[in-house]
Image: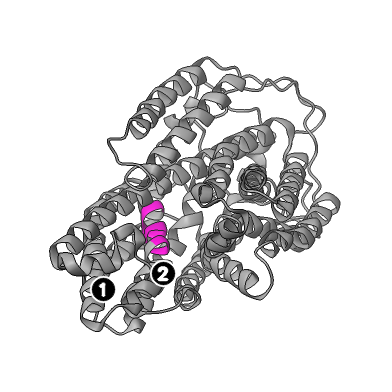
Amino acid sequence: MTHAPASEGMDTGPEPAAENTVKPANFGLIFAALMLTMLLGALDQTIVSTALPTIVGELNGIEHMAWITTAYILAATIGMPVYGKLGDLMGRKNIFLAGIALFLVGSVVCGLAQNMGTLIAGRALQGLGGGGLMITSQAIIADLVPPRERAKYMAPMGAVFGLSSVVGPLLGGWFTDAHSWRWAFWVNLPLGVLALFVAAVAIKLPRKAVDVTLDYLGTALMAAAVTCTVLFASWGGTQYEWGDPLVIGLGIGAVVAWVLFFVAERRAQEPVIPLHLFRSPIFNVATLLGMIVIGLGMFAIVGYMPTYLQMVYGKSATESGLLLIPMVVGIMATALPSGAIMSKTGRYKIYPIAGTVIIMVVAYLMSTLDVSDPVWVVCVYVGLAGAGVGLMMQTLVLAVQNDFPGSEVGTATSANNFFREIGATLGVAVVGAVFASRLTDKLSASIPPEAAAKIGDSDSLTPALVRSLPTELRDTVVNAYQESLVPIFLYLVPVFAVGLVLAFVLKEKPLADNADWHAQNAGPEAPADKEPQPVG
């Protein structure tokens, strides 16, 4: 990969503030702003979930309801590699500020929306900005802090994702019930403006004076591939049958677009996802591990346990969200101390191994759940799952960053997150399809035809409807739901076993300390046709 000459000084961050650190004196303020922007970007993936019924009712757009969430996820996923690449080429500060500004503009559009088309467009703008917030925040930390010390800062940044998955639905429901669903978007403005101001004033990263050659073809093909993949996974078996021509067309389009994308990347001058990233065994293994364990482990639990608690235990939507708080506690309980230990030792391999083992054990335990189990048992399992995720999420990102020079850390970070998002989307879709199929079969087999009319098909089941049924029929539906979902966790155990093999295979390159990090970033860039050089 060829770069044009840079202006004086590579983007190596500020000069050391003290002999043993490269952090600027106001690093605490910068870190707080980065954490806030990451929280905003992650929060908006889930904050509208509990507000959806009210939104589509007010804007008369139930047929477009799925797009309120899909537009954000699609735009954020597509934007991740672009932000990472542009940050490496142009410097990260202005790219970061542009991401915040775009996110705020999207929030205003959503808050003012009077129809579904405007709301969906605003969500897409939010997603384009939100993808940049999540990626560039991690890359700026990499500019300011060497990998060994960076571990203790990456850990809480990873915990933000778990926190947002729980807090988002709770906030969305509270805003909708107590004020208006529009506050789910207005709340971004004061927080986002504060983060924008702090970032503009506090972050000091030299701009890179380079002639940037954008990979327009690769970006367009990547956008097409991601769109077809996400829609195929989201619509197949839900809005459309798997055999529907539209779903088949999306599947074929995804395969063709991915093939063309990687062909285009071979020829691009500045590919948005350079193929030489895949020459790094650490990048390949860490990315696969994130797709399999975190994508399936965290998102399957977050996606289906709230509904399980509502259907089987009769909890309200708010209560089921609160009962996921143990996951956040579990993430924080392992992410923070493991990050501190990694900073002291420079070693990280044990944590993905331990995290995968925990999640694999939790999947087995969840497969043994019964309707007679007290709710605290579910909470314990959810907390253990969080503990497993906390050991892995940012550890894998850190391992990837440590394997590449500073000039490519944004590209490597964004590619790792990008493929993890794709894996999570596909994993949740597969779990959902298997669950829906099993539930339909169970209901058909266990409910007499004369009673089936009272509940309709499986798509029309709601917690309120189940609670309103006669006791015997309600118990039948609850048992069908439990027997349809719980065994799926057992199916995930061998998948996580594959993840455990990958965790053992993951190469451990000691995290670079201050001196190694400076030596690496002061030297010439690694040629594009060579593997990343060791920095540990």
Residue positioned most to the right: 201
- Snapshot quadrant of residue 401: top right
42 vs 262, left or right, is right
Res. 478 mark: 1
Instruction: Identify the residue under disc 2.
Output: 306
In this rendered view, identify the residue nearer to me: 501 or 63.
Answer: 63
Instruction: Indicate yes or no whether the magenta region holds residue 344.
Output: no
Residue 404 visible here: no
- Snapshot quadrant of residue 336: bottom right
Question: Residue 440, how many percent across, how many down?
Answer: 23, 57
Q: Secondary structure at mark 1?
A: helix
12 vs 423, left or right, is right
In the picture shown, does residue 25 fall above or below 234?
A: below
In this rendered view, identify the residue nearer to me: 295 or 452.
Answer: 452
Q: Which residues are magenta?
A: 295-303
Q: Which residue occupies 56% across, 55% down?
A: 45
Q: Secondary structure at mark 2?
A: helix
Question: Residue 73, how many percent across, how many down?
Answer: 54, 46
